[in-house]
Image: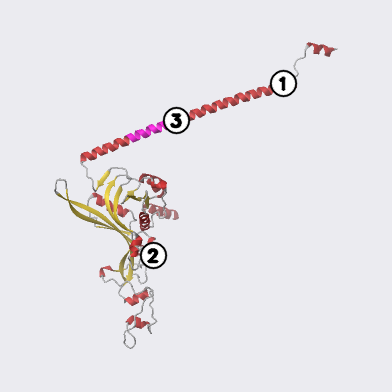
């Protein structure tokens, strides 16, 4: 049973989309901070502490997918690059694409959003679970193909929510992608007015807060542990009712967190009955609470420029500013195929040359080894002959001469 559970959990983990947010090339410090904010937005299924070095900045999306994305199980790569005053973002689906290229017209950092808020939201626990994705104004089945592709890509960047098994307490954040279509009138070369549509995608990041409703605001402060200062009152009942025992108006009791407090939303459309217990005091099951969105940042205003097959090096499927006829598309495709064929041929020739040089080098080394072995054999043979000749002189004096034989007989 444990093996089955581990196999099921591993298979479920493989279905979870994982992202890699990178910065390519040199960029301003604000762009670097924007990359960090986007990484925090993509938590928890992203490489939050990924560091780019000089070598990685020169890597293409295909190299990132081969060297990093595939081994780490990354499904989406978000690449930010700056060229002059232009900030570009490329969103690639690994390992085979497509690649969506956006131009960021405006952006705001998370610290800029917090600086204009009276009560910024701060909770690390909200980033332990992925956000809920909302795509607005992207149309239905009749929408253009590039709009459908944007909607599907944005949705697939985050894990899908199973409504039957989701825990309400895990839904702490919302990422909104809102498509805005503006129609502008321009004049062509012939002096005719031409209407042109400009499409922008506004990206926002919110935190979800819930507050109990149906109770007095002062009681709600006590429920939320915002303890008031009661030093000017005789009894807590004076704080609740707002009057003293004599019927006079009770002095105001300021909360320890300040006079400013979140008032109960007047819009009843934000009031819901919680099917499960939610985070925050007083948000119990089957109780009515008011939902409120607090922006976290960053903000991005994106324009889709083009869509390419593969990882940034394939055919252009859509371009917002350049339109080509069918013949031009065929010519470009034939030219690209010819270039790819020439590149393949050059690679094959290069590989053959490398292999030939390797064989020549190995043959040269082999000849050297043979010559060295022959020299060693000759030296060993000479050494053995020398030892044999020296041993014969010491053990055997050789045949006696005639005079030596005659002297011996006497």
Q: Residue at x 40, y 47 (%)?
A: 56
Toward the front, the furthest residue is 84
Snapshot quadrant of residue 219: bottom left
Pair 2/1: label in front: 2
Colour scheme shown: secondary structure
Snapshot quadrant of residue 172: bottom left
Mark 3 vs 1, N-terminal side = 3
Pair 3/1: label in front: 3
* Residue 318 appears in the rendering: yes
By secondary structure, the bulk of the magenta-drawn segment is best described as helix
Choose between 99 and 277: the one closer to the eye. Answer: 99
Provide the secondary structure element on which disc 1 rests: helix
Mark identifier at residue 123 = 2
* Residue 286 appears in the rendering: no
From this view, report whether residue 55 is shown above or below residue 246: above
Q: Residue at x 68, y 24 (%)?
A: 387
- Specify start and end residues of the magenta stretch as a single range: 342-360
Mark identifier at residue 126 = none
């Amino acid at each position: 049973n444990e093996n089955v559970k581990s196999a099921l959990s591993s298979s479920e983990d493989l279905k979870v989309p994982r992202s890699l947010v990178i910065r390519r090339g040199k960029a301003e410090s604000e762009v670097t901070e924007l990359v960090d904010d986007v990484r925090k937005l993509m938590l928890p299924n992203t490489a939050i502490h990924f560091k780019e070095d000089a070598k990685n900045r020169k890597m293409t999306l295909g190299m990132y997918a081969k060297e990093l994305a595939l081994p780490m199980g990354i499904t989406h790569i978000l690449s930010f690059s700056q060229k002059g005053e232009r900030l570009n973002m490329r969103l690639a689906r690994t390992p085979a694409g497509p690649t969506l290229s956006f131009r960021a017209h405006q952006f705001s950092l998370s610290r800029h959003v917090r600086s204009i808020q009276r009560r910024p939201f701060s909770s690390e626990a909200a980033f332990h679970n992925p956000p809920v994705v909302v795509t607005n104004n992207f149309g239905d089945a009749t929408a253009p193909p590039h709009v459908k592709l944007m909607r599907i890509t944005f949705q697939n960047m985050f894990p899908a929510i199973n409504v039957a098994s989701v825990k309400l307490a895990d839904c702490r954040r919302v990422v909104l992608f809102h498509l805005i279509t503006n129609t502008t009138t321009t004049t062509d070369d012939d002096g005719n007015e031409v209407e042109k549509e400009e499409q922008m995608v506004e990206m926002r990041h919110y935190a979800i807060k819930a507050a109990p409703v149906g109770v007095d605001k002062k009681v709600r402060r006590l429920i939320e542990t915002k303890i008031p200062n009661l030093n000017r009152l005789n009894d807590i009942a004076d704080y609740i009712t707002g009057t003293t025992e004599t019927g006079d108006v009770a002095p105001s009791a300021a909360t320890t967190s300040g006079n400013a407090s979140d008032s109960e939303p007047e819009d009843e459309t934000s009031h819901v009955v919680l099917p499960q217990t939610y985070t925050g005091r007083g948000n119990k099951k089957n109780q009515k609470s008011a939902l409120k969105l607090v922006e976290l940042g960053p903000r991005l205003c994106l324009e889709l420029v083009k869509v390419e097959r593969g990882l940034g090096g394939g055919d252009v499927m859509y371009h917002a500013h350049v339109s080509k006829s069918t013949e031009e598309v065929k010519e470009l495709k034939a030219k690209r195929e010819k270039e790819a064929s020439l590149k393949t041929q050059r690679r094959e020739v290069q590989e053959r040359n490398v292999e030939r040089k390797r064989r020549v080098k190995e043959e040269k080394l082999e000849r050297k080894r043979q010559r060295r072995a022959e020299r060693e054999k000759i030296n060993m043979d000479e050494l053995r002959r020398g030892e044999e000749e020296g041993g014969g002189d010491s053990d055997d004096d050789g045949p006696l001469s005639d005079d030596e034989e005659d002297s011996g007989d006497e």
